[in-house]
Image (spheres, helix red, strand yellow):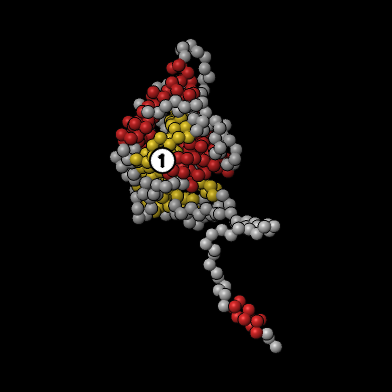
Amino acid sequence: MVRPRLLIALASFLSTPLFAQAPAGPVAPQQGVTPQAPPPQAAVKVRVALVTTPATVHNSKGEMVHDLEASDFRLTDNGVAQRIVHFDLGGDPLSIVVAIENSSRVEPMLPQVQKSGIVISETVMGGSGEAAILAFNDDVQRLQDFTSSGDSIERAVETLKTGTSGTKLYDAMAQGVEMLTSRPEPTADSPGRRRILLVIGEAEDDGSEMKFGDVLRRAQLANVTIYSVGLSTTRAQLQEKPQDTTVHPTPPGTISRAPFPGSMPGPDTDANLYGTGNLMHAVVWAIKHVKDAAKDNPLQILTMGTGGAHLATFKDRSIEKALDSIGGELHSQYSLSYTPTGTSETGYHEINVMVKRKNLKVRARPGYYIAE
């Protein structure tokens, strides 16, 4: 015979909801009871919804080609042909983060950097662009958030002050990439904004917590194109000291040989001198070995790995000329976007952009990497 008290207790249990609401606040653990550790979380896999690559096209004379249509391009991801969902020729507005080194190492060159604000606002940004300014030395400072005001950008650059001797290049670049992820990307239905990271500084890092390969991976996954203007510590020393002072012949951010006879200095010059194939191997290596450091040509590798370009400022190429060249390219290059289909989700993805016309050279980003 079942007792009345037992029936009451059983009825109370059955009437309790199986899915009860969580308590309003945290529950304090009982004394003497060790809280149970939460189960380990599974690794989060990144699914790439959209891949955008710039495509700079030159003819046999080195002139940029501006009359191509989407149908003139063939784009593959790991060898699988992809459908271009967004196509543009220099029309999408730009979102740019400009990271400027203001360490004491390049102090003699800061007056030239300070004068470049007008080139950034008028030539690089363009009429519909926006920009933000970072400064980096032993620290990274945000001098100006995103704005379409050219006056604000020029003021931030003109008032740049000399900092300490450190150069946290990779930390500054990582912060720039993070800022750019908030800007809308182009899609099949919306023009969005092209994401550009422009670095003005030495091709050298000192003290960053962020690793070289990690910066490259993040930039590629965020569809950020990196351009850089290399500051020369040798030029800074020559401007600060007598002309007969002995200095190292190949400072960071410069090249040790003159351009090939008959060639004009431009975005591809450094890649030609170092060997495009060698740099491309270095790009793939950097993506796969994210924890290792790049000892040689880090800015060349970072720019090539995202479809951008590195321009050294040495001899006859000034900061203003380098920025003017970058601005001209940004507003005259193609932008191709696609959603990867028919390829594996993880690992290295090789991008290949081809033009169906003959005797044309294409520069685009080589690929991206998705960790398992």
Q: Nearer the viewer, residue 252 or 71?
A: 252
Work out which residue is located at the far bottom of the displayed protein and give it: 1
- The reply, left or right, for residue 338 in relation to residue 283 is left
Q: How many marks?
A: 1
Q: Is residue 163 left or right of residue 281?
A: left
Q: Nearer the viewer, residue 352 or 335?
A: 335
Q: Secondary structure at mark 1?
A: strand
Choose top left, top right, bottom left or bottom right for residue 129.
top left
Residue 290 position (above or below residue 161):
below
Q: Nearest the camera: 81 or 36?
A: 36
Above or below residue 78? Residue 166 is above
> Which percent across, then down, holds residue 242?
46, 12
Residue drawn at 48 percent across, 24 percent down: 104
Q: Is residue 322 above or below residue 147?
A: above
Residue type at numbered disc 1: Ile
**Residue 281 in the image: x percent, y percent?**
55, 39
State the residue position of label 1.
196
Residue 241 visible in image: yes
**Residue at figure coordinates x 57%, y 73% from the top left:** 18
Determine the residue positioned at 37% across, 28% down.
159
> Depth check: 214 or 315 in front?
214
Based on the displayed image, in which of its 4 quarters is residue 134 positioned?
top left
Q: Residue at x 55, y 69 (%)?
A: 20
Give how far across and how far down residue 364 sits, in percent.
44, 42
The percent position of residue 157, horizontal first and vertical second, equals 37, 30
Q: Quadrant of the N terminus?
A: bottom right
The local crowd at label 1, few if under 14, some if 14 to 19, many if 20 or more residues have their Cα within 10 Å, is: many
